[in-house]
Amino acid sequence: MDRKVRVGIIGCGGIANGKHMPSLKKLRNVEMVAFCDIVRERAVKAAKDYGTPDAAVYEDYRELLKDTSIEVVHVCTPNRAHSFITVDALESGKHVMCEKPMAINSAEAKKMLDAAKRTGKKLTIGYQSRQRADSKYLKAEAEQGVFGDIYYAKATAIRRRAVPTWGVFLNEYEQGGGPLIDIGTHALDLTLWVMNNYKPKYCVGTTYHKLNNQTNTGNAWGDWDPAKFTVEDSAFGFVVMENGATINLESSWALNTTEVREAVTSVCGTLAGGMLLPGDKVQINGVRNGRQYVTTPDLSAGGVAFFDGNSNPSAADLEAKQWIDAVVNDTDPCVLPEQAYCVTRILEGIYESAKTGTIYNFKED
């Protein structure tokens, strides 16, 4: 396309460098023209690595938002800042891609959703796991009615010893929580998306601080500092939807188990079931002609080229492409803000139930 989409990046840390900026750089109709970070050196480096020759650098995101030529903003900051930066960006006339989770709580997420509706600007949240081949296949099966009525699902994000020790991941104030809000959010988003069910009724949750005071941990990224590990190390939830469907949610950064699976879901319906397996595989089970069957489709074939020379793009690349396409073509992005808002409501419900030791009932919004 001739038109270039001018993009500004707010937050030039790990997720921006690990996902957003590399994927945007591969898009021929995108120019990253502005970079903002409270640590100026990070913004300067990002501008050098990914920006146009005249890319601007800022330490205050509000200065970046004054540039009326910027059409799209990516918010890649710690969770606490997602809401107010996104609202300000929408109010300034920008479309916004905000990294997951949507916000630290439902009240802040609601402000984002309301701002998008008020301004008419597009808002999406970075749940790139929807773009994986296995996730898309499972979703397509659900849409075609293969599973029938899905009444039970399991959302799983379990690590054995992979606690992120960089940035502010262990800081409850900045992040709003630990593995539940960090990786459990991906598994829950996938589950709700496949079920196409966004009406929770009540939930029960538990959170644990069982391993975060340990040392000599065998952690994948080195030992964590117990004094800084203020979030939970594991969290689990039992969610009942308004139609009676049940979701079990498991999340942990550190758990004494060998059953390690992250950002996956299993769904069980009246006609069949499906589950995402390690290695981005999907398995479908059911009964046909009076016999039980299990099938595992070959997901290595049939992909569509993302750009010249790449027929197997990453989920991050596909996320960036569909998002920019939605902006250019004025269509809905894959992840709607209403859907991400429901994810945040459920995460908050699990945390609140764990805190109070009681059932959390979802009120009508």
Image: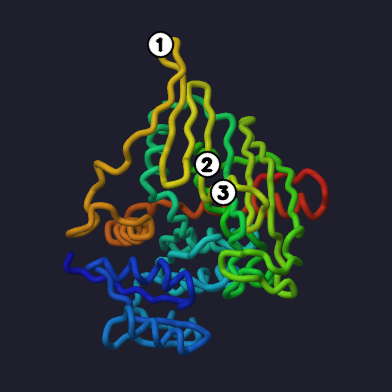
Q: Earlier in the sequence, mark 1 or mark 2?
A: 2
Q: What's the residue type where badge 3 is placed?
A: Val
- Element assignment for label 2: strand
Q: Earlier in the sequence, mark 3 or mark 2?
A: 3
Where is mark 1, residue-wise?
289
**Dot 2 crowding, Cα within 10 Å, few <14, some 14–19, many 20+:** many
Question: In the picture shown, does residue 67 fall above or below 15?
Answer: below
The percent position of residue 342, horizontal first and vertical second, equals: 58, 49
Report how far apart the C-alphas of labels 3 and 2 lie in the structure.
13 Å
Where is mark 3, residue-wise?
260
Question: In the picture shown, does residue 307 fall above or below 46?
Answer: above
Where is mark 2, residue-wise?
265
Q: What's the residue type where badge 2 is placed?
A: Thr
* Image quarter of residue 178: bottom right
Report how far apart the C-alphas of labels 1 and 2 lie in the structure.
27 Å
- Residue located at (18% from left, 59% from top): 309
Report how far apart the C-alphas of labels 1 and 3 lie in the structure.
35 Å
* Image quarter of residue 219: bottom right
- Residue located at (36% from left, 87% from top): 56
Q: Nearer the viewer, residue 299 or 27?
A: 299
Q: How is the image coloured?
A: rainbow
